[in-house]
Image (cartoon, helix red, strand yellow):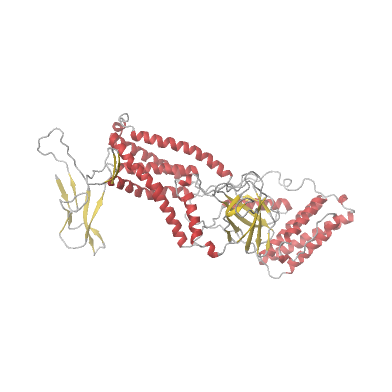
């Protein structure tokens, strides 16, 4: 019997007189719909004066209204009804219908195997994620650059050779530094390696980058994709689009190459941004592909990615099976058939609808883990504070070598106006070298206008002279030709320290060092402890999805469960190979059209490395004020 109320109608069950015949099948379809009109007075949809007519079907709504106005219909497809109170009864049929249970067991087995591999890969990646403070940085150098080297993804792109780098700027060039880390391998295929390089003074606008390797090891050939240099004081970034082989037997056959900084039009080109965004998108945004090779600096671990994939898979199965057993449309055309297996257009539409319903859930689950900042735990300083960096035995050759190195570093800038000096071979060369340093201090003192160059240069001289003074004080005067010469050298060094301190304080007063403001990260970042909330939601969603998938599977029976698996396969196929790639490519095109390059993000790990460097400088020169 059809019962009707204003705006809606429903089917009620009522006994009626009939003769029941064996084999007679009675099919009852229930659905909800309503008629509404647009009220111009209230500016909203309303059901007043409208009711659903008896000729309504699941595809069309028959509306009866007592006024003439714009009206429409709302149609909501309810999922298949399953009685939860029959859970024990339905689960008791597992021996007759183990299709869905077997599928879930196979997926969970695959998940556990992949999870074990992901744990191993995450531990391996964590040890290689660190930002390296270069060992050959001079301890007194305090102007820092972050060098990010991206090795290509081509076959055998990684190198076993020892790589060196030289930065060339408009105001000078750095010393040649070895890019290596004793705690991890560097320059592996597809890896992003980050190094902190320190100089005594700012190099100005970065113009060139010189890379070279010694062609050693079993696989010395190296394919460099891109190098990014960031001034950690001014946050300015330079891009070097290398994209070539540094090799003796590949490409141009050169193991030493100089690259020019990319121009603005090269950085903002559609091709470059699209390629970078697409590569980053498939390695990070495509949840299924990113399990294999996620970005090395991403806080979204492989374990979390695998678990999110499993949760999404279970949720897809639950949504798919809940809307599966709808009335079959006999007029639905068969798209293709393999033997007795037939796939109709209705089957494809079920897969499409399930995939579209999963899209927002996909973004929600992944965003939770992606938006959690990793917990950074401060590393305790190593014991043996001073002896770890100072030589156990101070000798005359040590003093001469360190003094020669200081002069060699500061003369790399033309602004310091220092000529090339011969190597220091004996104590007789020490006093002329100190006189050269004295002249440089006068040059710095005579500069009326203060800038970062003079601040950092005077700071470097102060730290280096303080180190020299400590070494001379520890050195016995018997190593000098006479005690008078020893005292004279000691007094001269003490005088230079006081002058360098005065010059540094003077320039620092007029040009303070940049204050490292606590920058607000781009986007909405969650505190580290939200990872527990993310895992709770993930496990809860997975558990609920598994329960309802099994419940519906037992409710449908074996035959319909097998047919449902075919629709599930179509849904997974379109999610992995259609929806996810389209999302990645769409985002890449969007940013490329906006001409927005990949940003260089701030990192708390960089701050820890800089604190480690400052502590190293204090212990090296013996001054806490630096």
Height in image: 514 above or below 10?
Answer: below
**Place of residue 38 in the rendered image (x, y in percent of width and height, measured from the top left):** 23, 61
Kindly indicate the quadrant of the structure image that contains residue 176: bottom right
Q: In the current view of this chain or complex, which residue is farthest to the top?
A: 95
Quadrant the C terminus occupies = bottom right
Q: In this view, does 491 lie to the left or right of 605?
A: right
> Percent from the top left, x then y, of residue 182?
65, 45
Relative to the observer, which residue lies in front, 242 or 503? 242
Residue 321, percent from left and from top: 31, 41
Question: Compared with residue 610, is residue 412 higher up or lower down, i.e. above or below?
Answer: below
Question: Where is 512 relative to 538, above or below?
Answer: below
| Foreground residue among 336 and 357 | 336
Residue 305 visible (yes or no)? yes
**Residue 342 placed where, x, y %?**
28, 41
Which residue is located at x 27 percent, y 39 percent?
82
Residue 371 seen in this snapshot: no
Q: Quadrant of residue 566?
A: top left
Q: Nearer the viewer, residue 147 or 538?
A: 147
Please indicate whether residue 558 sits to the left or right of residue 271 in the image.
left
What residue appears at the point 71 percent right and 71 percent down from the top-left corner? Answer: 448
């Amino acid at each position: 019997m059809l019962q009707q109320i204003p705006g809606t109608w429903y089917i009620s069950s009522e006994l009626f007189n009939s003769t029941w015949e064996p084999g007679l099948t009675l099919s009852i379809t229930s659905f909800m719909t309503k008629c509404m009109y647009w009220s111009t007075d209230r500016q909203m949809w309303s059901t007043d004066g409208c009711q659903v007519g008896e000729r309504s079907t699941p595809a069309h709504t028959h509306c009866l209204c007592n006024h003439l106005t714009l009206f429409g219909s709302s149609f909501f497809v309810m999922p298949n009804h399953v009685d939860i109170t029959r859970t024990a009864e339905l689960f008791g049929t597992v021996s007759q219908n183990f299709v869905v249970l077997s599928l879930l067991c196979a997926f969970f087995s695959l998940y556990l195997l992949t999870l074990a591999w992901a744990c191993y890969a995450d531990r391996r990646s964590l040890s290689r994620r660190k930002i390296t403070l270069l060992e050959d940085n001079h301890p007194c150098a305090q102007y820092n650059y972050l060098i990010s080297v991206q090795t290509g993804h081509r076959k055998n792109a990684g190198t076993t050779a020892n790589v060196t780098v030289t930065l060339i700027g408009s105001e000078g060039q750095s010393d040649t530094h070895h890019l290596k880390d004793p705690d991890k391998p560097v320059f592996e295929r597809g890896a992003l390696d980050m190094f902190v390089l320190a100089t005594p003074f700012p190099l100005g606008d970065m113009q060139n980058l010189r890379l070279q390797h010694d062609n050693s090891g079993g696989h010395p050939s190296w394919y460099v994709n891109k190098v990014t240099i960031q001034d950690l004081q001014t946050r300015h970034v330079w891009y070097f689009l290398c994209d070539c082989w540094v090799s003796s037997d590949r490409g141009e056959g050169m193991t030493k190459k100089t690259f020019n900084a990319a121009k603005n039009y090269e950085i903002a080109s559609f091709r470059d941004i699209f390629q970078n965004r697409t590569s980053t998108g498939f390695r990070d945004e495509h949840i299924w592909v990113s399990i294999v090779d996620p970005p090395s600096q991403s806080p979204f671990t492989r374990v979390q990615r695998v678990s999110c994939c499993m949760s999404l898979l279970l949720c897809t199965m639950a949504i798919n099976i809940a809307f599966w057993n709808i009335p079959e449309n006999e007029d639905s055309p068969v798209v293709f058939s393999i033997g007795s297996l037939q796939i109709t257009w209705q089957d494809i539409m079920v897969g499409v609808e399930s995939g579209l319903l999963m899209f927002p859930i996909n973004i929600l689950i992944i965003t939770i883990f992606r938006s959690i900042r990793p917990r950074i735990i401060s590393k305790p300083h190593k014991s043996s504070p001073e002896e770890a960096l100072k030589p156990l035995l101070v000798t005359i050759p040590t003093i001469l070598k360190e003094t020669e190195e200081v002069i060699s570093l500061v003369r790399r800038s033309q602004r310091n106006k220092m000529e090339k000096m011969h190597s220091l071979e004996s104590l007789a060369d020490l006093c002329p070298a100190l006189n050269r340093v004295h002249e440089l201090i006068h040059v710095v003192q005579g500069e009326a206008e203060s800038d970062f160059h003079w601040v950092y240069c005077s700071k470097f001289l102060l730290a280096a002279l303080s180190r020299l003074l400590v070494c001379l004080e520890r050195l016995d005067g018997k190593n000098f030709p006479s005690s008078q010469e020893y005292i004279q050298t000691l007094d001269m060094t003490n005088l230079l320290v006081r002058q360098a301190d005065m010059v540094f304080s003077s320039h620092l007063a007029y040009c303070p060092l940049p204050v490292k403001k606590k920058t607000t990260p781009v986007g909405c970042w969650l505190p580290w402890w939200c990872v527990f909330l993310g895992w709770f939601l993930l496990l809860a969603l997975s558990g609920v999805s598994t329960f309802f998938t099994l419940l519906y599977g037992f409710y449908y029976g074996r035959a319909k469960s097998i047919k449902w698996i075919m629709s599930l396969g179509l849904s997974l196929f379109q999610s992995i190979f259609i929806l996810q790639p389209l999302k990645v490519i769409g985002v890449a095109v969007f940013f490329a059209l906006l001409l927005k390059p990949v940003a260089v993000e701030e990192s708390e790990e960089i701050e820890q490395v800089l604190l480690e460097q400052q502590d190293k400088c204090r212990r090296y020169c013996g001054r806490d004020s630096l």
